[in-house]
Image (tube, grey):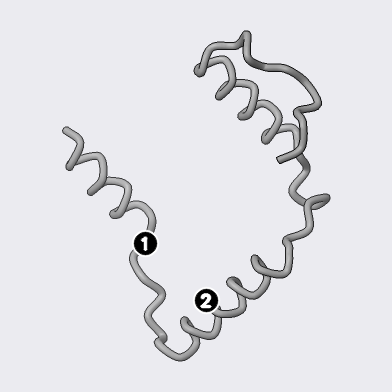
Amino acid sequence: MAAPILDFSHLTPDERIELAEQLWDSLDAAQVEPDEAQVAELRRRRAELAADGDPGEPWEPVIREIGERGA
């Protein structure tokens, strides 16, 4: 692993997470190209969906069920 550009050891874990989230949010998705492995995985998933035809579950019921499990 390469030496870090900046030293973040003085930050708490929560502060590091917040910083990572801010860095991530600062990226413009249109400027970030997927790598070859990501493109291959997307193609595999698209082919699997085309072969199976089952699009899965809608997001709303899934997130509701997750919330109910945590209650």
Find numbered disc 2 in the image and state the secondary structure of the residue it sits on: helix
Q: Going 68% across and 35% down the picture, which residue do you hit?
A: 24
Front-most of 14 and 69? 14
The mark found on residue 58 in the picture is 1
Say left or right for 58 vs 6.
left
- Disc 2 marks which residue? 45
Q: Going 41% across and 85% down the picture, which residue do you hit?
A: 53
If the image is split into quadrants, where does the N terminus sit?
top right
Disc 1 to disc 2, C-alpha distance:
17 Å
Query: Badge 1 local density, few (<14 within 10 Å), some, or many (20+)?
Result: few
What's the residue type where badge 1 is placed? Pro
What's the residue type where badge 2 is placed? Arg
Q: Residue furthest top?
A: 10
Image coords of residue 43 (percent x, y)? 61, 78
Find numbered disc 1 in the image and state the secondary structure of the residue it sits on: loop
Front-most of 68 and 42? 42
